[in-house]
Protein backbone atom coordinates (compact mmCIF):
# COMPACT_ATOMS: atom_id res chain seq x y z
CA UNK A 1 0.00 0.00 0.00
CA UNK A 2 2.78 2.41 0.94
CA UNK A 3 4.75 1.26 -2.05
CA UNK A 4 1.83 2.04 -4.43
CA UNK A 5 1.32 5.47 -2.83
CA UNK A 6 5.03 6.17 -3.16
CA UNK A 7 5.04 5.13 -6.84
CA UNK A 8 1.89 7.17 -7.49
CA UNK A 9 3.40 10.26 -5.81
CA UNK A 10 6.66 9.79 -7.70
CA UNK A 11 4.74 9.49 -11.00
CA UNK A 12 2.77 12.69 -10.30
CA UNK A 13 5.97 14.61 -9.48
CA UNK A 14 7.68 13.28 -12.59
CA UNK A 15 4.75 14.17 -14.89
CA UNK A 16 4.32 17.71 -13.54
CA UNK A 17 8.02 18.46 -13.71
CA UNK A 18 8.38 17.56 -17.40
CA UNK A 19 7.71 21.12 -18.51
CA UNK A 20 10.84 22.21 -16.61
CA UNK A 21 13.01 20.30 -19.06
CA UNK A 22 13.89 21.95 -22.34
CA UNK A 23 13.99 19.61 -25.28
CA UNK A 24 14.92 22.25 -27.84
CA UNK A 25 18.38 23.70 -28.11
CA UNK A 26 18.39 27.42 -27.41
CA UNK A 27 21.46 29.50 -27.28
CA UNK A 28 21.72 32.47 -24.94
CA UNK A 29 23.46 34.37 -27.74
CA UNK A 30 20.24 34.27 -29.75
CA UNK A 31 18.48 36.36 -27.12
CA UNK A 32 21.20 39.00 -26.91
CA UNK A 33 21.41 39.14 -30.70
CA UNK A 34 17.79 40.25 -31.01
CA UNK A 35 18.31 43.51 -29.12
CA UNK A 36 18.09 46.22 -31.78
CA UNK A 37 18.91 49.89 -31.31
CA UNK A 38 16.23 51.70 -33.32
CA UNK A 39 17.70 55.15 -32.71
CA UNK A 40 20.56 54.57 -35.13
CA UNK A 41 21.01 53.01 -38.55
CA UNK A 42 23.88 51.03 -40.03
CA UNK A 43 23.98 53.14 -43.19
CA UNK A 44 22.39 56.58 -43.38
CA UNK A 45 20.41 57.73 -46.44
CA UNK A 46 22.54 58.88 -49.36
CA UNK A 47 22.45 60.41 -52.80
CA UNK A 48 24.08 58.74 -55.81
CA UNK A 49 26.99 61.20 -55.69
CA UNK A 50 27.79 59.99 -52.15
CA UNK A 51 27.98 56.30 -53.12
CA UNK A 52 31.71 56.41 -53.83
CA UNK A 53 32.48 57.35 -50.21
CA UNK A 54 33.31 54.46 -47.90
CA UNK A 55 33.58 56.16 -44.51
CA UNK A 56 30.21 56.26 -42.72
CA UNK A 57 30.76 59.78 -41.36
CA UNK A 58 31.87 61.18 -44.74
CA UNK A 59 28.84 59.60 -46.41
CA UNK A 60 26.53 61.13 -43.79
CA UNK A 61 28.16 64.55 -44.25
CA UNK A 62 27.83 64.23 -48.02
CA UNK A 63 24.10 63.51 -47.65
CA UNK A 64 23.63 66.43 -45.26
CA UNK A 65 25.55 68.89 -47.46
CA UNK A 66 23.80 67.74 -50.64
CA UNK A 67 20.29 68.08 -49.21
CA UNK A 68 21.14 71.52 -47.77
CA UNK A 69 22.52 72.62 -51.13
CA UNK A 70 19.55 71.33 -53.14
CA UNK A 71 16.97 73.04 -50.92
CA UNK A 72 19.10 76.20 -50.70
CA UNK A 73 19.34 76.45 -54.50
CA UNK A 74 15.55 76.11 -54.81
CA UNK A 75 14.89 78.78 -52.17
CA UNK A 76 17.38 81.22 -53.72
CA UNK A 77 15.38 81.20 -56.97
CA UNK A 78 12.66 83.23 -55.21
CA UNK A 79 12.64 86.84 -54.09
CA UNK A 80 11.19 87.70 -50.72
CA UNK A 81 9.88 91.15 -49.80
CA UNK A 82 10.13 91.81 -46.08
CA UNK A 83 9.62 94.71 -43.66
CA UNK A 84 12.30 93.83 -41.11
CA UNK A 85 15.61 92.01 -41.38
CA UNK A 86 15.45 88.31 -40.52
CA UNK A 87 18.21 86.09 -39.20
CA UNK A 88 16.65 82.94 -37.75
CA UNK A 89 16.91 79.20 -38.02
CA UNK A 90 13.88 77.18 -39.02
CA UNK A 91 13.67 73.41 -38.75
CA UNK A 92 12.29 71.24 -41.51
CA UNK A 93 11.38 67.67 -40.52
CA UNK A 94 11.76 65.25 -43.42
CA UNK A 95 10.64 61.64 -43.59
CA UNK A 96 12.70 59.40 -45.86
CA UNK A 97 10.80 56.16 -46.45
CA UNK A 98 12.22 52.72 -47.18
CA UNK A 99 11.84 53.31 -50.94
CA UNK A 100 13.92 56.51 -50.85
CA UNK A 101 11.06 58.99 -51.23
CA UNK A 102 11.32 62.22 -49.23
CA UNK A 103 8.22 63.72 -47.60
CA UNK A 104 8.01 67.07 -45.83
CA UNK A 105 6.58 66.24 -42.42
CA UNK A 106 6.67 69.54 -40.50
CA UNK A 107 8.18 73.02 -40.45
CA UNK A 108 9.06 74.72 -37.20
CA UNK A 109 9.40 78.46 -37.61
CA UNK A 110 8.82 81.48 -35.40
CA UNK A 111 5.69 83.58 -35.71
CA UNK A 112 7.65 86.50 -37.20
CA UNK A 113 8.89 84.31 -40.06
CA UNK A 114 5.39 82.93 -40.63
CA UNK A 115 4.01 86.48 -40.84
CA UNK A 116 6.76 87.94 -43.03
CA UNK A 117 7.18 84.89 -45.28
CA UNK A 118 3.74 83.29 -45.58
CA UNK A 119 4.70 81.40 -48.76
CA UNK A 120 7.79 79.82 -47.22
CA UNK A 121 5.90 76.63 -46.31
CA UNK A 122 4.74 76.04 -49.88
CA UNK A 123 8.18 76.90 -51.29
CA UNK A 124 9.81 74.40 -48.96
CA UNK A 125 7.25 71.77 -49.96
CA UNK A 126 8.05 72.33 -53.65
CA UNK A 127 11.80 72.28 -52.90
CA UNK A 128 11.52 68.97 -51.07
CA UNK A 129 9.34 67.49 -53.83
CA UNK A 130 12.03 68.35 -56.40
CA UNK A 131 14.71 66.42 -54.55
CA UNK A 132 15.35 63.22 -56.51
CA UNK A 133 14.78 59.82 -54.97
CA UNK A 134 17.65 58.72 -52.76
CA UNK A 135 19.03 55.52 -51.29
CA UNK A 136 17.20 54.87 -48.00
CA UNK A 137 18.85 54.21 -44.66
CA UNK A 138 19.83 50.60 -43.98
CA UNK A 139 19.45 48.74 -40.68
CA UNK A 140 20.70 45.13 -40.62
CA UNK A 141 20.53 44.89 -44.39
CA UNK A 142 16.93 46.12 -44.60
CA UNK A 143 15.89 49.54 -45.98
CA UNK A 144 14.16 51.50 -43.21
CA UNK A 145 12.22 54.74 -42.86
CA UNK A 146 14.12 57.54 -41.14
CA UNK A 147 13.43 61.06 -39.97
CA UNK A 148 15.81 63.88 -40.69
CA UNK A 149 15.68 67.34 -39.10
CA UNK A 150 17.09 69.93 -41.47
CA UNK A 151 18.08 73.28 -39.92
CA UNK A 152 17.84 76.15 -42.40
CA UNK A 153 19.23 79.59 -41.67
CA UNK A 154 16.92 82.29 -43.03
CA UNK A 155 18.92 85.48 -43.42
CA UNK A 156 17.19 88.33 -45.23
CA UNK A 157 17.87 92.06 -45.14
CA UNK A 158 15.47 94.88 -45.95
Image (cartoon, rainbow, N blue to C red):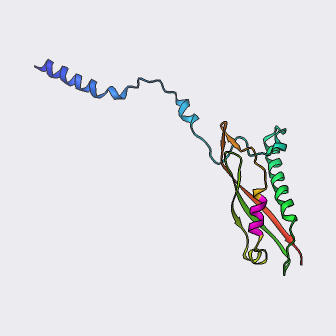
Q: Quarter of the image containing the C terminus? A: bottom right
Horizontal and vertical percent position of residue 122: 74, 67
Q: Quarter of the image containing the N terminus? A: top left
Horizontal and vertical percent position of residue 7: 19, 19
Residue sitting farthest toward the bottom: 83
Name the residue rendered at 79%, 47% in the picture. 60
Residue sitting farthest toward the right: 158
For this view, does 128 lie left or right of residue 8? right
Q: Quadrant of residue 121?
A: bottom right
For this view, does 24 lie left or right of residue 93? left
Horizontal and vertical percent position of residue 30: 54, 31
Name the residue rendered at 80%, 70% in the picture. 88
What is the span of residues highlighted in magenta in the rendered image?
120-127
Q: Nearer the viewer, residue 55 or 156?
A: 156
Q: Is residue 131 above or below residue 140?
A: below
Name the residue rendered at 26%, 26% in the picture. 13
Q: Quadrant of residue 136?
A: top right
Horizontal and vertical percent position of residue 114: 74, 74
Q: Is residue 35 above or below residue 158?
A: above
Q: Nearer the viewer, residue 111 or 121?
A: 121
Name the residue rendered at 74%, 43% in the picture. 135
For this view, does 58 lie left or right of residue 137? right
Q: Is 143 a magenta residue?
A: no
Q: Is residue 51 above or below residue 65?
A: above
The number of callouts visible is: 0
Q: Quadrant of residue 94?
A: bottom right
Q: Is 123 a magenta residue?
A: yes
Q: Nearer the viewer, residue 16 or 99?
A: 99
Magenta segment main secondary structure: helix
Amino acid sequence: MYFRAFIFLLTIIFITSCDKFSFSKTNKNQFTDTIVNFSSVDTSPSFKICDSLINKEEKSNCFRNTIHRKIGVELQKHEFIIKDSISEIIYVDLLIDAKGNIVLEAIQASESIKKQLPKLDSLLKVSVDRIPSIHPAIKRGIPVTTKYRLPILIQLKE
